[in-house]
Amino acid sequence: MFKISRHLVAAAGSAALVLALAAPAFAQTARPAAPAAGTGAVGRLSGTVTDKNKNPVAFANVIVLGTKQGAMTDEKGVYVVPGVPVGAAQLQIQATGYDKVVESVQVNAGVTTTTNIVLGEAKVTKQFEEIEVRAEKRIDTKSSTTKQTISAEKLREIPVDRLQDAVALKAGVVAMGGDLHFRGGRAGEVKFQFDGVEVSDPLFGRNANIASLAVAGTDVLSGGFDAEYGNALSGVVSVNTKEGTDRFGGEVRWDTDRYGDPTKTFDNYDRFTFGFGGPTAVKNLTYFLTYEGSFTDTYLKTTMTKSSHTLLDFLQFGYRQNNQVNTNFKLAYRASAKQKFTFETVNNRTLATPYNHLWSRQGFVKVTYDTLASGITPRYGTWSATKDDSTYQAQNLPDHVPTTDNSFQQFTGVWTNQLSDKSVWTTRVSSVQFKTLTTINGKEPWQYEIRSPEYWTGNTGPGSEQNPFFATHGDYPQYARRQTGTYTLKSDYTTRRFKQHSLKTGLEIKYNRVQDLTLTLPNSENNGLPGATRSSFLNYNPEGAAYFQDRWEFEGLVLNAGIRYDMFTPGDQVATRDLPSGKRYKQQFSPRLGIAYPISDKDVLSFHYGWTYQTPSRNFIFENRGIGSAVATQGNPDLEPETNIAYQAGVQHLFSRDVSGQFSVFFKDIYGLITTRQEPDQFGQLVNVYFNGDYASARGFEASIIKSFSHKFSAEVNYTYSLATGVASDPNQALQFFNGGRLYLPISEQPLAWDQRTTLSVQGVIRDPGKWGLRMLWVYGSGFPFTPAFRNDRRPDPALENSRRQPSNSNLTIDGDKYYRIWGQNVTVFIDARNVLDVRNINTLDTNSFPNPYIDSAGRDYLIYYTETGRAGGAYLKDVNGDGVLDWVPVNDPTIFQEGRNVRMGVSITF
């Protein structure tokens, strides 16, 4: 009863707020331009405008003479004029190429009067050369989806490095630790699509990146999904990629923060980008090619050894701490006026060595050799910044941190077949591959140099610096090799054959291959296999979906109704005994219902109710379940899809020709989120297993106001106030209870880790086209929650979970550019200053101290330090002065904070 009543309250509250927002628009619509007889009530006019051959006349102007009421016919010749004063009225219809028509009508209060108009024969007044004009649609009068658009031009204007960073600026989106959270959902609940094909890793849910110059446009959907969108609880980011045209053109760009001297740099950053396309020797075949390479040591620069080459004492080549290359190649062939084929490949590769504060020092360590042990065994002793004698050996610890090599590759073929003027059939075939290798200088697991806990013990004895924090030698004990492949066949059919109905239906079939090998302490053994803890599996599974969507337009009201069917199975490799429910095939039907109602020519009211499902990431399903398993939590092939039930209401308002706004309220319940519990295995031993047990909810208000470019100025403001609460932020959070770390399991909702109550982004552009431009971006976010920690509190109270708040964060970016015309080419020189005010924003309050056995001996030291002192940056406890009382020893971990001020410059050439 509680859940049902909360749904009703949420729906009622949403409707009330939206009606309050819409009230001024209703008032404006209902106010007649001239007083009508009687009470001043109003009615509505609607109908169709056709020619003498009964063909619809689109874009005809329909005006009620003597008032300010009017409308324009759509492509079907339909018009709707609301708010017309009752009584006799003169209706004027005027369309290009036709004689003006005036009809007398009688308007009655509170009803719709239908008047169909027939124009005379069309006349060609004058033939003009065709001119193509492109503009963004200000408001969508037929959709109940919350959709925000990022055009290719807008993406170029925003001072961000990745498309994901641009998405993070939108209303309803919270960025935390590199992850995107839509409307309070978990990070893995957002799916990316490239040209209609999902590009998410089925193993861990990560999304692919794409070169900025390859993007033609992006739709950010955060609520009110039509039935064609599935397997995404919280959001969809749909990317359309560029195609070549019949004219050759492109751009080359270089960004850097190096100023001619190795010491004069912020992050040792370089970014090379080019994109070009045009026709080929084959008629009607075009191409587009992009390359984007980013190379940086990041603001967390280490002393790791890197090979590099310098050209002309200025250009530096070679690997750095973070190296990313994105490429895209697309062919488009127009076989006929109604047949089109495209083939595209998208490739990403990232080679990154993260900063690890435990493994951050460079110096010398004392080494002696024990000949009494089996073989000659080195014994590591004290640490020194200098080589004190011949027994000290050089150690550069950042060289012993694993490097992660991530790659992504997608091949997609699309066939678009326009069956008629009103029907289109599209078929897509795609292959998506993700690969990951995490290792140290290409080492195999048995080659790791691991001596835990001797990493630190030699530096804590007599004569040492008594520092148990920093490692003195050895490889960080982590190794991973993963690979996934997803093969997709997808077909969609869209038609407008039926009067007042736009129908869309589709079918999607997928086949997944997922493989994982993850080891900690790789050269150790457990049950005769490598790794102290180990995840190892290879599985195959199919899944599929089908949907039907109808958009029905009736007298100005638009009803969007749809149903989606999803099916998933863990595959034949899973034994029947591992499926206690007896259901090998998980099947769901998710209804979607939305209403859009234009209440004036400048306002649209919408409401949407829908169910969405998402299959859990495959690591939760297939985590090693064999006898030799050594994982902390085993997978569960019998998991059900997670479920989201969402309500939203919204208003779109056109303030003026250049200024539009979108306002939404939303509420959603999320059931069946992944958590852990203990179950007996086949031998009766209790093991930790994933299952559907967590619950969360989110509610909030979003506002987005956009001023398109005019009068040398454009702007965009995105604001969100939301609350994200739930039982747990992390699927493994319940392990703290099973391992004796908590008093009891949480039984009520608490703020989730990404519950950032207020977010605000403000963008502004001042530009004199063809001469210069100045841009500003300010991002503000209220503080994230955190859980206070206390010394020796071995069983913390779950009621304190995320009960306190971090400081707010803000970031101001200003950049400018100047245009030049050099040798017939458009050349732009620019400068980009980020975090101009050098604000010290907190990135995280806690880090993983693994495998150090001395840190966190009294709890979570970083968090305890911040709880007690209010200072971020990390510390550990140690009796410094020998008085028997533990003191804080700050370690100044730079990963706790975000990057400070950074200034880049660059140049681009367009052709």
Image: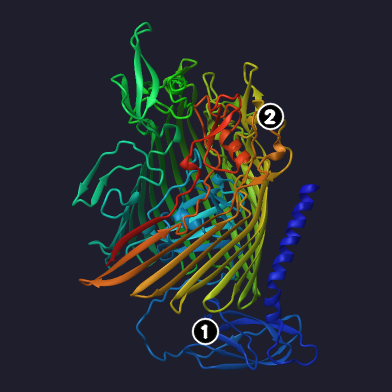
- Please, what secondary structure does the residue beneath circle 2 have? loop
Image coordinates for residue 184, horizontal then vertical, percent: 62, 50
Q: Quadrant of residue 823?
A: bottom left
Q: Quadrant of residue 718?
A: bottom right
Image coordinates for residue 654, horizontal then vertical, percent: 58, 75
Identify the residue at horizontal 74%, vertical 61% (top origin). Answer: 13
Q: Which residue is mark 2?
A: 795
Q: Amino acid at mark 1?
A: Asn
Is residue 608 visible in the rendered image? The answer is no
Q: Is residue 746 above or below residue 721?
A: above
Residue 53, disc: 1
Identify the residue at horizontal 57%, vertical 93% (top origin). Answer: 101
Identify the residue at horizontal 42%, vertical 89% (top origin). Answer: 124
- Residue farthest to the top, as pictured: 372
Is residue 13 visible in the rendered image? The answer is yes
Q: Closer to the camera: disc 1 or disc 2?
A: 2
- Residue farthest to the left, as pictured: 312
Residue 225 left/right relative to 96: right
For the C terminus, give its image quadrant: bottom left
Mark 1 vs mark 2: which is more N-terminal? 1
Image coordinates for residue 158, horizontal then vertical, percent: 44, 62
Q: Amino acid at mark 2?
A: Arg
Image coordinates for residue 141, horizontal then vertical, percent: 59, 71
